Image (tube, helix red, strand yellow):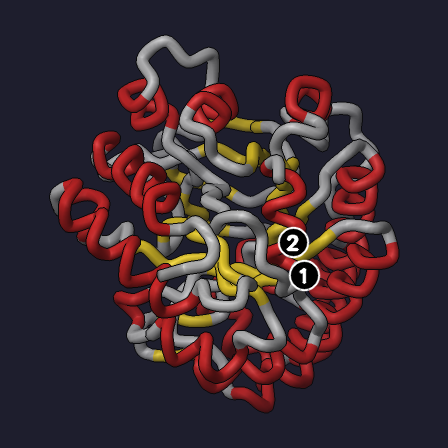
């Protein structure tokens, strides 16, 4: 099998020739330390023989502020830091009138697909082309503020409904464009939980989030692509609803949030491909390559039998991850991940 066949087989709950290994985001400094002469992060992934390359939608800066923050096309202000994803600090929607008048960024803007056209040109047919975006929740949270949207689920439900519908329509248009441009797997990155559990009750999730997530997953399938649902945190009380959307994969099954790969495999492994869960909170930044190797071997033992498993980190290869641990993770997956798993 090549990488495209391997990833698609696993996401369809089949058993490929070996366990695929993917990452959605690798910090550029780590990538260049792992492969010093790499052209870019995608080239690093390719030369490490990972099974995917990927990127996300691009939203340009439209204004800088004296405090060092900047505003993007959504009208959200961010404080840049050391990571690839900046931290949102304030959004433009505070009232029902703001929600009604808000217009999302143009999904058809020429730059919206970011690096995707170049990745398709370079890697189509050799590496699975992954595009990461969101459904409705996290952009809505950025627009209103995370604390405010959680309160507004109960206090201002009309405001939340208006914003989430506008966000979803825009995001669906971007994802549709990405699939038609060559993306084969869409990763939906809305986070729903912390290490202590979901940010909202299951009832709130079912009313506000689940139907919009289902619309996005259905559209992805109608367009001929596969879907991985990403959310950090303790998802146990939401698992059944997430799986019911028909998403093909679940990521990252975060160990530091108490998500046990073996347990989730037993609960849901016949219905959804598991994508994870090598700890990037402590192991990949501070562990040794031997510890990474042992952890990868255990993850494969816990979740790879029968197929439907893809190895990745428990979130991303962020700037604190050791490059030698990234390469150890990939090499161990190749060593222990060949079927039949022993």
Spot occupied by residue 241 in the image (x, y as percentages of width and height):
62, 82
Please say whether residue 56 is visible from this viewpoint.
Answer: no
Please say whether residue 295 is visible from this viewpoint.
Answer: yes
Indicate the quadrant where residue 326 lies.
top left
The residue under label 1 is 12
Query: Are circles 1 and 2 on residues that touch, CB within 8 Å?
Result: yes
Instruction: Work out whether 213 lies above or below 224.
Output: below
State the CA–CA distance, disc 1 to disc 2.
5 Å
Indicate the quadrant where residue 106 lies.
top right
167 and 124: which is toward the camera? 124
Mark number, residue 95: none
**Circle 1 sits in a helix, a strand or a loop, which is it?**
loop
Spot occupied by residue 142 in the image (x, y as percentages of width and height):
54, 55
Instruction: Work out whether 267 lies above or below 107.
Output: below
**The N terminus lies in quadrant:** top right
Task: Look at 35% across and 61% down and name the residue there.
Answer: 342
Task: Look at 72% across and 38% down and name the residue there.
Answer: 183
Question: For this view, does 82 lie left or right of residue 94?
Answer: left
Spot occupied by residue 293 in the image (x, y as percentages of width and height):
22, 48
Question: For this view, does 240 lie left or right of residue 64?
Answer: right
The residue under label 2 is 9
Task: Look at 63% across and 25% down and name the residue there.
Answer: 115
**Which residue ends up furthest to the right in the rendered image?**
222
Q: Say few, some or many: other residues with alpha carbon within 10 Å of mark 1 (under 14 / 14 to 19 / 20 or more).
A: some
Task: Look at 46% across and 44% down and name the residue there.
Answer: 21
Spot occupied by residue 169 in the image (x, y as percentages of width and height):
80, 56
Instruction: Work out whether 289 lies above or below 236.
Output: above
């Amino acid at each position: 099998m090549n990488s495209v066949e391997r990833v698609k087989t696993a996401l369809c709950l089949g058993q490929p020739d070996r366990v695929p290994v993917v990452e959605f985001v690798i910090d550029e400094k780590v990538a260049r330390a792992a492969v010093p002469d790499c052209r870019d992060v995608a080239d690093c992934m390719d030369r490490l023989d990972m099974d995917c390359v990927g990127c996300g939608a691009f939203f340009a800066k439209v204004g800088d502020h004296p405090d060092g923050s900047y505003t993007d096309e959504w009208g959200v202000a961010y404080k840049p830091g050391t990571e690839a994803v900046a931290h949102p600090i304030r959004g433009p929607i505070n009232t029902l009138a703001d929600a009604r008048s808000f217009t999302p960024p143009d999904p058809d803007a020429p730059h919206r697909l970011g690096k995707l056209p170049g990745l398709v040109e370079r890697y189509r047919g050799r590496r699975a082309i992954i595009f990461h975006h969101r459904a409705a929740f996290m952009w809505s949270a950025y627009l209103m503020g995370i604390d405010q949207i959680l309160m507004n689920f109960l206090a201002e439900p009309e405001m939340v409904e208006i914003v989430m519908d506008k966000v979803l329509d825009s995001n669906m248009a971007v994802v549709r464009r990405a699939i038609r441009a060559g993306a084969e797997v869409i990763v939906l990155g809305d986070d729903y939980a912390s290490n202590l559990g979901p940010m909202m009750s299951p009832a709130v999730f079912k009313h506000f989030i689940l139907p919009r997530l289902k619309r996005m997953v259905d559209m992805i399938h109608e367009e001929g692509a596969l879907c991985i649902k990403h959310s950090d945190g303790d998802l146990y009380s939401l698992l059944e609803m997430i799986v019911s959307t028909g998403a093909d994969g679940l990521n990252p099954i975060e160990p530091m949030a108490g998500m046990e790969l073996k347990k989730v495999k037993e609960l849901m492994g016949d219905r959804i491909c598991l994508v994870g869960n090598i700890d990037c909170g402590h192991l990949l930044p501070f562990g040794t390559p031997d510890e990474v190797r042992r952890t990868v071997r255990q993850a494969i033992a816990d979740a790879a039998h029968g197929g439907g498993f893809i190895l990745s980190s428990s979130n991303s290869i962020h700037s604190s991850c050791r490059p030698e641990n990234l390469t150890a993770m990939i090499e161990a997956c190749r060593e222990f991940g060949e079927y039949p798993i022993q």
